[in-house]
Each structure stands twice: as C-alpha cells, then as structure tokens.
Image (spheres, helix red, strand yellow):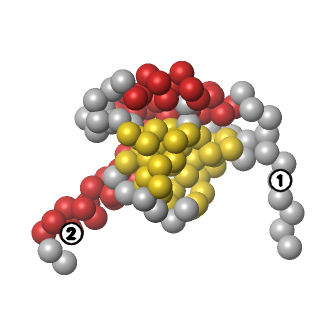
Amino acid sequence: MSTSDEAGVQAVDEARESFVDLLPMGPDIELRRMFGTLAALVDGHVFALVLGDQIGVKVGEAGRSELSRMPGSAPLLLGGRPMVSFPALPPGLDDDEVHAWLSRARDHVVAHPPQPRRRRR
C-alpha cells in the first residue's frame, strides 16, 4: 500500500471514529451499516452518515442553505452521485461544531413520524 493510500485509509478511519464520538447519543439513536458505510438513525430515519472522510447530515432546507454558504461544503457523493438531502460538513470544523450539526440533524429528523418497522422474511 502506498503512502497516499495509507493516508486515505487513515483519514476514513478518523472520520468514522469522530462520527461515532461526536454523535448525540441516546437510547433512541441506532448505528447501522448502510450504503457500505456507517449511518446514524433515530426512529428509523437516517439523520447522518459518514462516507469516506466526509460526514453528511440531513438538516432540511434551511440547514442545507446555511451549509452551502460555508467554504468547502458540498453534497455528499454516493457512487459519484450527489446526495442532495445530505450535505457534507465542510472540512476544518471543530468537534463542537460537528456535534452541533449532528444534533441539529437529529432534531430535524425527530420531527418526522417514526418509520414503521419492517417485518423480516
């Protein structure tokens, strides 16, 4: 593995660790592997996920607008396609800012009715 590959893997690992450490944890928060990555859910709704070294948050139109004005913010890319509902947090945010955005995303999603549980086959 080349040095740049190792640095990329380390950046992804650090993003996942940061994601888990900074989540507003509670009994209603669930971590689940989705889309080949790690997602945070509340009441069955995804409110944040980490793809590569980026953290995406579902914060509604006002939050997306606010994030779009921040330098370095962009839609999260999944398979090269933008996930418009999940803007990526710009690089360089401190832990308190990341935690605040994750909390805001959780609060946005909590306002929706819970997803019905799917029956397993």
Viewer can see residue 28: yes
Image-quadrant location for residue 55:
top left
- Secondary structure of residue under mark 2: helix
Going by the image, does 100 lie left or right of 31?
left
Label 2 – label 1 distance at C-alpha: 40 Å
Where residue 34 appears, as percent x and y from the top left, is: 58, 60
From what the image shows, is residue 2 above or below residue 4? below
Going by the image, does 101 lie left or right of 9?
right
Work out which residue is located at the far bottom of the displayed protein and give it: 1
- The number of numbered badges drawn on the structure is 2
Where residue 44 appears, as percent x and y from the top left, is: 72, 47
From what the image shows, is residue 97 above or below residue 53? above
Task: Give the residue at x 24% y 62%.
Answer: 8
From what the image shows, is residue 64 above or below residue 75? above
**Which residue is nearer to you in this view: 22 or 6?**
6
Name the amino acid, label 1.
Arg
Q: Which residue is mark 1?
A: 117
Image-quadrant location for residue 42:
top right
Going by the image, does 29 lie left or right of 74?
right
> How many residues crowd mark 2 within 10 Å: few (<14), some (14–19), many (20+)?
few
Where residue 81 appears, as percent x and y from the top left, is: 47, 55
Q: Quadrant of the N terminus?
A: bottom left
Q: Earlier in the sequence, mark 2 or mark 1?
A: 2
Res. 86 mark = none
Viewer can see residue 24: no
Q: Which residue is mark 2?
A: 5
> How many residues crowd mark 1 within 10 Å: few (<14), some (14–19), many (20+)?
few
Task: Give the residue at x 27% y 55%.
Answer: 11
Where residue 18 appears, as percent x and y from the top left, is: 37, 45
Q: Quadrant of the C terminus?
A: bottom right
Task: Give the residue at x 52% y 42%.
Answer: 84
